[in-house]
Amino acid sequence: MNAEMGHLSLKSMFAICDTGYMPTVEETSPKSVKVNVTAGTGMDIDWKDGHHSHYSFQYLRDACPCALCNDERVRENREPGQPRPSQPGMLPMFKASPKPVETAGVGKYAIRFTWNDGHEHGIYSWEFLREFCPCAVCSDLRTAAKAPGAGVTRTVPH
Ligand SMILES: [Zn+2]
Ligand SMILES: [Zn+2]
């Protein structure tokens, strides 16, 4: 029997601990933010920890953190950024792709969009945006954190 202690490799990974994921200041502070409205390609953020995030406008619209959109997502069991499923029996309708008509900073902690469909109540904090970074690495982390048996119950003694 070889008793192996796995503490070395675990340290270099994101700790999924019992108190939930606490992002560092570096991770949630943008170094630069670009909103490419004219090109229509979405928003790019370079974070202080060196990570880069790209959000399409569609993703941002589907991730709108306002109470209304949040309720809707909970009802439909969607993650922020996940598109709405097409309703069975309904013909697909043409919808203009979402684009912000106005972008405004909210203090130092967030950004707000007024969308071309008139919606404007979502305040996207940097923390929120970093948490829902759509890149493969971050999506994998979110999936791992949600997997059965991960996180919450791990450290509870039986
Ligand atoms: Zn909303
Ligand atoms: Zn990412």
Image (cartoon, rainbow, N blue to C red):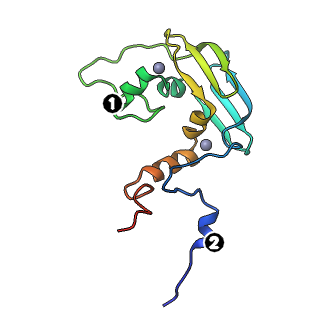
Q: Nearer the viewer, residue 60 or 136?
A: 60
Residue pictured at 33% horizontal, 25% vertical? 86
Q: Nearer the viewer, residue 22 or 114?
A: 22
- Number of marks drawn: 2
**Residue of label 2:** 8
Residue lying at the far front in this picture: please name it: 157
- Mark 1 / mark 2, whichever is N-terminal: 2
Q: Quadrant of residue 7?
A: bottom right
Q: Quadrant of the C terminus?
A: bottom left
Please say if 37 is above or below 77.
above
| Left or right: where 18 falls relative to 112 | left
Distance of label 1 from label 2 (alpha carbons): 41 Å
Residue 131, image x and y in percent?
A: 56, 40
Sort mark 1 into few (<14), some (14-19) or many (20+) by Cα contacts within 10 Å. Answer: few
Residue lying at the far left in this picture: please name it: 89
Please say if 97 is above or below 46.
above
Q: Which mark is residue 76?
A: 1
Q: Nearer the viewer, residue 82 or 75?
A: 75
Residue pictured at 73% horizontal, 45% vertical? 49
Q: What kind of element bears circle 2?
A: helix
Please say if 7 is above or below 120.
below
Residue pictured at 73% horizontal, 44% vertical? 50
Q: Amino acid at mark 2?
A: Leu
